[in-house]
Amino acid sequence: MNKIVAVENNLAPIKDYLLDQGCQVIDVDSAGGTRVDAVVISGSSKDLLGMQDVVIDAPVIDARGKTPSEVWDNIMRY
């Protein structure tokens, strides 16, 4: 179940939880061009990856107001 998940830097508890679940976690900032299974953002990000025209072929999960386990449940739905 080695999912690759891009996570914003300010979401350390979620990163730690995903690592405990066996995910490979990378920073959203370095995810450009990398195949990921999901992207987790804090909800305050209007402009993902600093570009408005970036196309990501993965679900983008807004972690605002969610516990790490709720984010994990969202990732597992995809």
Image: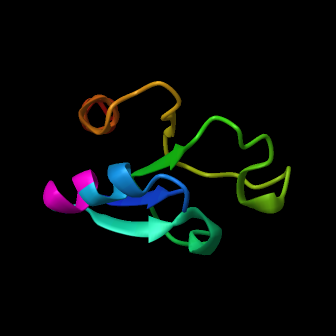
Q: Residue at left 70%, top 52%?
A: 55
- Reply yes or no: does residue 71 show up in magenta: no
Q: Position of residue 39 (x, y in %)?
A: 50, 49
Q: Quadrant of residue 2?
A: bottom left
- In the picture, measured across the screen, residue 76 lies left or right of residue 20, that is right
Q: Residue at left 35%, top 51%?
A: 13
Q: Is residue 28 above or below residue 55?
A: below
- In the picture, measured across the screen, residue 55 lies left or right of residue 4, that is right
Task: Please give the range of residues in magenta.
Answer: 17-21
| Main SS class of the magenta portion in the image | helix
Q: Quadrant of residue 43?
A: top right
Q: Position of residue 76 (x, y in %)?
A: 24, 36
Q: Nearer the viewer, residue 38 or 40?
A: 40
Q: Is residue 9 above or below residue 69?
A: below
Q: Position of residue 34 (x, y in %)?
A: 52, 71
- In the picture, measured across the screen, residue 75 lies left or right of residue 45, that is left
- In the picture, measured across the screen, residue 77 lies left or right of residue 46, that is left
Q: Residue at left 72%, top 51%?
A: 48
The answer to whether any part of residue 48 appears in the image is: yes
